[in-house]
Amino acid sequence: LEKELNENSRLKSQVRAPSEHHVHSVALDFKIRDHLETTIAPAANGENGSWELFCEDGEMKLFTREVELEGGVCVDPLRAVHVVDNISAKEICTRFWDTEVRLEWELTIETCRVCEVLSDRDVVLYQTHKRVWPAAQRDVCYVSGLREIRLEKIAYKEPELERFGELKNCWLVINYSVDHDGAKLQPGMVRATVDVAMICRTYVRHGVTNPTRKDIKTSIVYTATINPGGWVPKKALRTVYRREYPRFLRTFTQYVAKKEQDLSLNL
Ligand code: 16C
């Protein structure tokens, strides 16, 4: 028995903590749950009175609301919905999360650096954004997590897409601001904060068992709330957002479609 107990404790000491457990896991799980409960709820679909539809292009719709903190800092939330053919939730979210390809599609950033690898699906990133005159340049430091979400956790339906096909899977990326020792504020730079969610669901055409690209549709819900940090002229900020968010969603989805078109479907 003693030998067996010794062997057990030797084995136990070799068992490592799950790779996904780290200093931000609890907060990240909380954020994920929160976004799954609110961001994809039909009540949040942006079409009720308080949201303004400011850009519509085919299936892509972008909404915003004017929100100001005390002191006049503008933190207008952005909500975008889109449906794309031929590319999967996994393909979209993986490319959105992957820092190796960030500069290939992200047109607003100057630099992007990994501060810490927390697990095989969570990282802390630091990036600097292009300066927009007359505001000071902004940087941001955030946790970025990639997850596949079990379908039983998805409480909300998308009736139009369910007429096309069966919900196959759901992937998401959550980006939210944190402090990190490897991302100290540089002179002349102002720290912005972000809370971003990209939630994608793929549907496979009814009756198809071996889907190819033409048999899938993926819904995208993208939300972002940016606090620009210090002073920014509100009018200019709103003009930049209304230009940059549609440009991002268009450029990014076209980028993923182009990169994936000759690869086999990764559902
Ligand atoms: O979600 C997106 N990208 C992710 C990966 O990069 C990540 C990014 C979050 C954006 C953080 C932006 C923080 C800076 C805000 C500064 C605003 C100052 C503007 C002053 C105006 C007078 O989650 C896609 C992000 C889509 C782009 C959103 C709009 C951000 C505007 C950035 C300002 C630079 C514009 C440069 C124009 C060439």
Image (spheres, grey):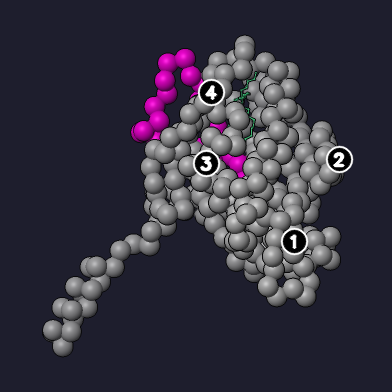
State whether residue 64 appears in this view: yes
Residue wearing tag 4: 138
Asked whether mark 2 and ligand 1 are closer than 8 Å, the reply comes as: no
* Marking on residue 95: none
Callout 3 environment at 10 Å: few (<14), some (14 to 19), or many (20+)?
few
Please determine whether, in this image, residue 158 is positioned above or below residue 259.
Answer: below
The image shows residue 188 at horizontal and vertical percentages of 47, 15
Please determine whether, in this image, residue 152 is positioned above or below residue 144.
Answer: below
Distance of label 1 from label 3 (alpha carbons) = 25 Å
Task: Write down the region rendered in magenta.
Answer: 176-198
The image shows residue 126 at horizontal and vertical percentages of 45, 33
- Amino acid beneath label 4: Arg
1 or 2: mark nearer the eye? 1
Q: Nearer the viewer, residue 133 or 92?
A: 92
Q: Residue at the spot x=82%, y=39% of the render?
A: 57
Residue wearing tag 1: 214
Give the quadrant of ligand 1: top right
Asked whether mark 4 and ligand 1 are closer than 8 Å, the reply comes as: yes
Of labels 1 and 2, earlier in sequence is: 2
Residue wearing tag 2: 49
Position of the N terminus by quadrant: bottom left
Q: Residue at the spot x=42%, y=23% of the render?
A: 185
Q: Residue at the spot x=51%, y=46% of the render?
A: 98
Could you tell me which secondary element the residue under label 4 belongs to? strand
Of labels 4 and 1, earlier in sequence is: 4
Could you tell me which secondary element the residue under label 3 belongs to? helix
- Amino acid beneath label 1: Lys
The image shows residue 260 at horizontal and vertical percentages of 62, 52
Of labels 2 and 4, earlier in sequence is: 2
